[in-house]
Amino acid sequence: MKEQMAVLPEYDRLFIPGPVGVRPEVLEAQVGPLMGHRTPEMEALMQRIQPGLRAIFRTQRPVYIAPSSGTGMMEAGVRNGARRRVLSLVNGAFSERFAKIAAANGLEVDRLEVEWGENHTPQMVAEAIKSQEYDTVTVVHSETSTGVLNPVREIAGVVHAAGDVVLLVDTVSSMAGAPVECDAWGLDYVLTGSQKALAVPPGLGLAVAQPGLLERAAAKKDRGYYFDLLSFEKNIEKNQPPNTPAMTLLYALAVQAERIAAEGIEARWRHHATMAARTYAWVDEMQAAGVPVSVLAPEGYRSPTVSCIVLPEGRTGPEVCAAVRERAGYVIAPGYGKTKERMIRIGHMGDHTMDGLDGLLDVLAEVLAQ
Ligand code: PLP
């Protein structure tokens, strides 16, 4: 085990579900020269980033980049897209956050709530939409607190069948790790953060808005200033940021977006699916060996980027995480919020390797056998 750890790159040890370890060449790119942000050099950098990002988001639209974490872009979607009444699909902590953001912005919000660890179905959403005059639905694709992947493509279908309703999609822990087709699935607004499967340091919020959502924004007088998507759109047409950008992070993003585009987004999706499958196989192996662990999310609705694993009686999330770190330097997360004690979460996302994941799972097996 020690020998294996010795050859693993440093970025292959941080297995929390974000932020994840970042490749040295991406980290090092951050020391690029500072410059004025209304200069040809900045325009060149902005222009350089777009093709890779559009390939990752599967869109012809520009990808907006804000100096904020993912939550900022959640608020941006709500401020620009929602008119009055929002249906929030809640199945964990981050989907609950989306509902809270909508309420904090003065909107009427109804929650379509299922248990933590469960997914929504298109049928549930179709039923709920019928009952009220909603203009907006919020959904989290990969609920990082539970490891559940919601069927966003099908949900988009029923939302749009309901008429003039937009879907705001949080892909903070799925973008670049799970298939997301911004254009082909007709997703009105899709947001993510830099620090998860994109494997860029934290600090950038990214989003794509379809023209229909921008039309709504244009009709809204109270869409705010800093996260005004029309301002992002107007500036990006000139390859400019709306305000002073997080320049050093943009250098890192440029390198990583090109790297991922060269790797191929579909190959990256496959790699994440393989890491997730390895994790489920490990759970089966543990069960066969008499250690009663289980994957919280139901089969068919599991996120390929994060697994939430229910621990055997008598073991706790914080204690298992501490033991794994102590034994071999791997970092994983306990459950989130109310599930902190009963579970652990493994973020198999970003640039993690199969060797890294295998090494972690070996150590975890040793810890759980104690
Ligand atoms: N949405 C999801 C699904 C997340 O996992 C997170 C963070 O873990 C967020 C939103 C919030 O993102 P940030 O911490 O970048 O603001």
Image: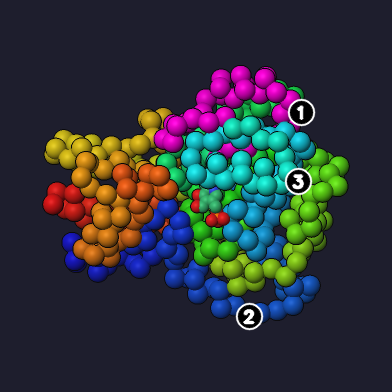
Q: Secondary structure at mark 2?
A: loop
**Identity of the residue drawn at 49% across and 36% down:** 91
Q: Which mark is residue 164?
A: 1
Image quadrant where one finds the N terminus: bottom left
Amino acid type of disc 2? Pro
Relative horizontal placement of residue 208, taking residue 322 as reference (left or right)? right
Q: Position of residue 196 (x, y in %)?
A: 49, 55
Query: N-terminal of the two: label 1 or label 3?
Result: 3
Q: Which mark is residue 318?
A: none
How dense is the environment of label 2, judged by Cα within 10 Å: few (below 14), some, or many (20 and up)? few
Q: Secondary structure at mark 3?
A: helix
Residue 199 in sight: yes
Q: Position of residue 21 (x, y in %)?
A: 42, 63
Residue 120 in magenta stretch: yes
Residue 61 in sight: no
**Identity of the residue drawn at 34% across and 67% down:** 9
Magenta segment range? Answer: 112-140
User: Label 3: which residue?
Assistant: 80
Query: N-terminal of the two: label 3 or label 2?
Result: 2
How dense is the environment of label 3, judged by Cα within 10 Å: few (below 14), some, or many (20 and up)? many
Q: Please, is residue 128 above or below residue 257 in the view?
A: above
How dense is the environment of label 1, judged by Cα within 10 Å: few (below 14), some, or many (20 and up)? few
Query: N-terminal of the two: label 2 or label 1?
Result: 2
